[in-house]
Amino acid sequence: MSIGIVGTGISGLHLALRLRQFGIDVTLYAAQDPDDIRSGPLLNLVTRFDSTREREKALGVTRWASGEYDNAWMHLSVEGPDGMSFRAQLPRPASSVDFRMYLATLLEEYQQRGGNAVRRGVADRAELARLAERHELVVVAAGRGALTDAFPRDAARSPYTSAPRRLAAGLFHGVRPPEPSGMTMHMVPGAGEVHAPTYHSFGGQLTGVLVEAVPGGPFAAVTDRNHRDDPEGFAQAVLELITTHTPTLRERVDEREFALARPVDLLQGAVVPVVRQGWARLSDDRYALAVGDAWIANDPLTAQGANLGSTLAFQLADVLREHDGPYDGTFCRTVSERLWATAQPIVDWTNMFVGPPPPQMGTLLAACAADQRMADAFVAHLDRPGAMWRHIRRPEHTDDFIARTLAVRSGV
Ligand SMILES: Cc1cc2nc3c(=O)[nH]c(=O)nc-3n(C[C@H](O)[C@H](O)[C@H](O)COP(=O)(O)OP(=O)(O)OC[C@H]3O[C@@H](n4cnc5c(N)ncnc54)[C@H](O)[C@@H]3O)c2cc1C
């Protein structure tokens, strides 16, 4: 069997490395080589939870396994007059490493293990169809770019038609880590959120700042102005936002030192949340499957997209190991629905969190602020998205989650 994989993000690379472990013939189509990836602009501010780190161990990727890269704590605050806050330790630490380093290293690792990588960007569906003739199946892991045209939007699973947040992110000097060190999320009702995780990048330990702006709200001045030619102006605008809206984050900032680490350490844009049809017919007998952001794009608010891409890559690898063809329409539809069972809770949870807050969200956050046992349970669920969604999808489920957490953990 021969599988072609287009894209060298976490979805494509975890899939390629896993299939090689299974002895399956893989060709990886890479639009960039490792040096291009390293020298490019900031890609995201991904935090990888323990489940993803466990998959890295299974892949034999140990570069970031040491405690030096751990982010063990999550701090959450709701800013403003009705503010509240809590913090909790993840059951097992997450890790936040610059994806330019992470992906370049994984691609090198794949090549060093003898993996077949072809330097090639695939322009469009027609080129994808030509490529598919060389393989029994192609997997599109090319993110939110051009090839998504091959996979129509699934309207029933995609409640948004525009981006619910505008995004601006950068890596900064001059922000002390929180105590204990880890990730912080500052929610500003009506305006959006600011994430500020401790982040490992080329200059060592920095702080990532991600502004998620409700369109038209007070954060939009930062996200909607094009900062590419004015990185210093960007840093100044972020500092003003932090000073005005997130006092708990401002306490960590030394304004004399506060600066973007490098001009390339800046990212602006928006994600329109979308679920696409997970497969495409390319010719009479050739099909493509989509994984990761190419299939499902979520707003980064819940920190799930890359973790989901890795999860789906492993699940797909298991399916391909069990099934040696034919990779026809029935196969692709069936696999796609099987993977959707994993993805759906993440999509629904994330879409709920970027929408107008439902009453159970206030109930849940207040319970976390009031009782450490709830804070621990909530933070533990960041890496258990299926269970998280079961507990928050309706107010009565949240009430039940709170009651059971407090009862069980008090030994009632
Ligand atoms: C600011 C921000 C913060 C985030 N924070 C988190 C977080 O904390 N946790 C989390 O889990 N997720 C987070 N995410 C989401 C996460 O970054 C994505 O979900 C994830 O990286 C998607 O991985 P992917 O491999 O599916 O796609 P991508 O990373 O987009 O990779 C696509 C690959 O395909 C290649 N490619 C594209 N087009 C072509 C083509 N035509 N031909 C060949 N190759 C092509 C690209 O070069 C790239 O290598 C965040 C996103 C943003 C923007």
Image: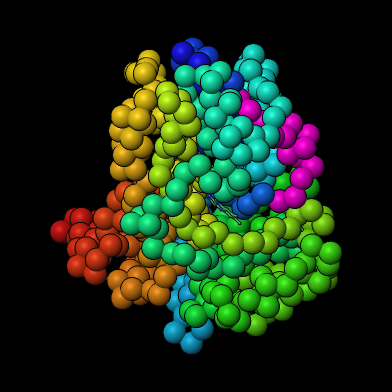
316 horizontally vs 30: left or right: left
Q: In this view of the protein, which residue sits in the foreground, 238 or 163?
A: 163
Q: Position of residue 380 (x, y in %)?
A: 38, 52
The magenta-colored residue range is 28-42
| Quadrant occupied by the C terminus | bottom left
Relative vertical location of residue 232 with respect to residue 285 in this rendering, above or below: below
| Quarter of the image where ligand 1 sits | top right
Q: Is residue 36 magenta?
A: yes
The one nearer the camera, 218 or 412, is 218
Instruction: Give residue 373's position: percent from left, percent from top.
Output: 33, 60
Q: Is 314 displayed left or right of 270 in the figure?
A: left
Is residue 84 depicted above or below 340 in this figure? below
Instruction: Say which residue appears at 34% left-offset and 43% top-offset.
Output: 340
Let me know if residue 54 appears in the view. no
Residue at (61, 64) in percent of width and height:
167
Q: Quadrant of residue 207?
A: bottom right
Q: Determine the residue located farthest toward the front in the rendered image.
A: 284
Residue 6 is covered by the magenta coloring: no
Residue 125 seen in this snapshot: yes
Toward which corner of the image does residue 82 lie, by quadrant?
bottom left
| Residue 360 lies in quadrant | bottom left
Q: Nearer the viewer, residue 157 or 222?
A: 157
Q: Residue at x 59, y 62 (%)?
A: 270
**Residue at 68% of width from left, 17% of height from top?**
112
Numbered circles on residues, count: 0
